[in-house]
Amino acid sequence: MSSVKDNRLKADHSGSAESIMPPRIVAFGGGTGMSCLLAGLREEPVEVTAVVSVSDDGGSSGRLRKDFDIAPPGDIRNCLLALSGQEPLWARLLDYRFEESQLAGHSLGNLLITALTRVTGDFDLAIRELNRLLRVRGRVLPANGGKLTLIAHHHDGSKSTGEEQIANSGKSIEKLEARPRVLEPADDVGRAIEEADLIVFGPGSLFTSVIPPLLIDGIRRRVIDSYAPKVYIANVMTQSGETDNMSLFDHLEALENHVGEKIFDEIITHDGNFPSELLENYAHLGSVPVVDCGELAGR
């Protein structure tokens, strides 16, 4: 992997010596893949900022988005818990999902984010407070403070609106757009990208987690302008209904098509060694390994 900038020296408060500051990493994505990445980075000597998509409209997040007119909290909750410095009981508590009554399907963490948003009057502020309360090692930031609705343009000329409909369409995606159009991210997000020593995309759902932040003009522009090395961590498996039959090159091309140019310095992928039982389990879900068919050699 390309090395991060080595200009991470800063004088200490006495001015008498220099200390090395940890590399600053900005990671884009959401869902289980991003949570696993963050959990691994939490123990490393790095400063992580996770920028999370806020376009989910299914499940508990979708219900809260509709009922309380807030940005969906689910992916952000998962990332907060992955970086939390609190004792494990907190993670179990906030991840607890009710199974009965009108609360069925909701996690306590999603409800807490909803309540904090109502109390503070601002989704960004609510997430900032949760970063503090959970002693997050790094930062978790929404890509933008409002709600985004994704619109997928399929190769057959049809459209699907919303993450849930996109995932259930079973059609290949040519282009993704977001409504309303967002020109600028929150100040903290823009500053994090500008100060980053390494920018990481993935792993996570390609069209509904990894690409959506790039639909925000200010994020896309800052990523392109950044001198920081850019790394794509590819998904291990295809996602049924979203990336069926897509090779590693197809994933990368879809991502860079939404950026507008080739930006990646490094690509991280699996070595192809999978237990047969794991492959069988994924096959039942309609997923197969994401493989390089030799197309990357010409990049």
Image (cartoon, rainbow, N blue to C red):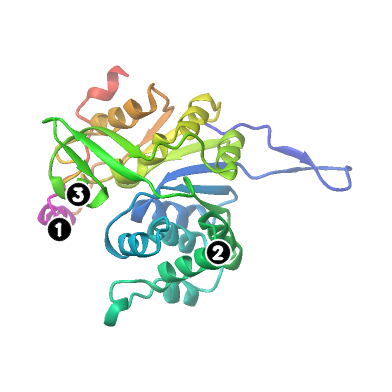
- Residue at image mark 2: 130
Residue nearer the viewer, 243 or 43: 243
Q: Amino acid at mark 1?
A: Asn
- Mark with earlier residue (2, 1): 2
How far separated are the C-alphas under marks 1 and 3?
Answer: 25 Å
Residue density around tag 1, few if under 14, some if 14–19, many if 20 or more, within 10 Å: few
User: Which region shows up in magenta?
Assistant: 276-287
In front of the other: label 2 or label 1? 2
- Mark with earlier residue (1, 3): 3
Secondary structure state at the residue bearing disc 1: helix
- Residue at image mark 1: 281
Identify which residue is drawn at 21% across, 45% down: 166
Which of the 4 quarters of the picture holds residue 193?
top right
How far separated are the C-alphas under marks 3 and 2?
Answer: 30 Å
Residue nearer the viewer, 169 or 123: 123
Residue density around tag 3, few if under 14, some if 14–19, many if 20 or more, within 10 Å: some
Q: Position of residue 171 (x, y in %)?
A: 13, 39
- Mark with earlier residue (3, 2): 2
Check if residue 225 falls in the magenta segment: no
Q: Position of residue 222 (x, y in %)?
A: 52, 30
- Quarter of the picture containing the C terminus is top left
In the image, taking residue 252 as reference, residue 134 lies left or right, namely right
Identify which residue is drawn at 55% across, 64% down: 130
Identify which residue is drawn at 76% across, 39% down: 10
Task: Point out which mark residue 165 bears.
Answer: 3
How far separated are the C-alphas under marks 2 and 1?
Answer: 36 Å
